[in-house]
Image (cartoon, grey):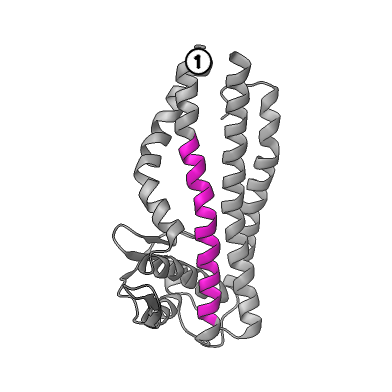
Amino acid sequence: MVLYPDSSLLLLIPGIILSVWAQFKVKHTYAKYAEIATRSGLTGAEVAQLIMRNAEVRTAEGARTYALGINCPIQAVPGELTDHYDPRERVLRLSEGVYHGRSIAALGVAAHEVGHAIQHANLYSFLMWRNAIYPMVSISSTLSWPLLFGGIIFGIGPLLKIGILLFSLAVLFTLITLPVEFDASKRAIRALASGGYLTDDELYGAKKVLSAAALTYVAAAAMALLQLLRLILIARGRD
């Protein structure tokens, strides 16, 4: 938020640097390992299907897990790094490069997204919390900016404080996203290793790709926290 240029803008510099570095890192790492084909010759979509077929799902009692598998459609979508799991429709959407790709990057990304589907099937707590607050965050994010703008530009304290409160929900969302993404990557590497879909040296590359992707979420969370801190300082300066 740069609509109020003052010395507090300096707070955002570390977050901006981290964000730029994270974007460079993920694109560079993905591009590198997207050029390296795996020995298995499987596509991202095929590996995703295999992992889901052998997925361990917690029983209703929650005491044990069984390889019950997950029935989740896999769709190819346009774009690069547009891969995601849709928890509302329970659909796995893979970018065309990952869906058809036979590279280390393709298999790593595909397995990561399957990790989210497995989280959903096992009612992973952080994913459930994120899904629960998403509708509120969607609304609060839309409303917060005009309130913050009005509060700062026109000096209306209550509007500024309400805007900060609404923006805090978006910050909370980014923080909850971190364990969700880290856990999905752990599940992905574990599944790729146990299924024999990647060799040890290929697993190293997949870890590099997923670590770079995770850095983008860390950068987003850091930037959101710095934005919130700046807004709080602005509000205190106007009291």
- Dividing the picture into quadrants, the one containing residue 39 is bottom right
Q: What element carries label 1?
A: helix
State whether residue 95 appears in this view: no
Q: Residue at coordinates 50% horizontally, 28% vertically from top-left? A: 164
Residue 46 position within the rendered picture, expressed as x and y whole percent measured from the top left: 41, 80
Residue 75 position within the rendered picture, expressed as x and y whole percent measured from the top left: 34, 68
Q: Give the range drawn in magenta.
A: 168-192
Tell me: residue 7, above or below residue 88: above
State the residue in front, 158 or 199.
158
Tell me: residue 219, above or below residue 54: above
Tell me: residue 42, above or below residue 214: below
Residue 3 position within the rendered picture, expressed as x and y whole percent measured from the top left: 56, 23
Q: Residue at coordinates 28% horizontally, 60% vertically from top-left? A: 89
Q: What residue type is labelled 1?
A: Gly
Give the position of the C terminus as an image quadrant. Answer: top right
Q: Say whether residue 213 is magenta.
A: no
Q: Residue at coordinates 50% horizontally, 79% vertically from top-left? A: 191
Q: Mark 1 points at which residue?
A: 157
Q: Residue at coordinates 34% horizontally, 44% vertically from top-left? A: 135
Residue 25 position within the rendered picture, expressed as x and y whole percent measured from the top left: 65, 58
Q: Say whether residue 190 is magenta.
A: yes
State the residue in front, 65 or 56.
65
Crowd tier of the residue under label 1, counting other residues whose Cα lies within 10 Å: few below 14, some 14–19, many 20 or above: some
- Dividing the picture into quadrants, the one containing residue 58 is bottom left
State the residue in front, 21 or 238.
238
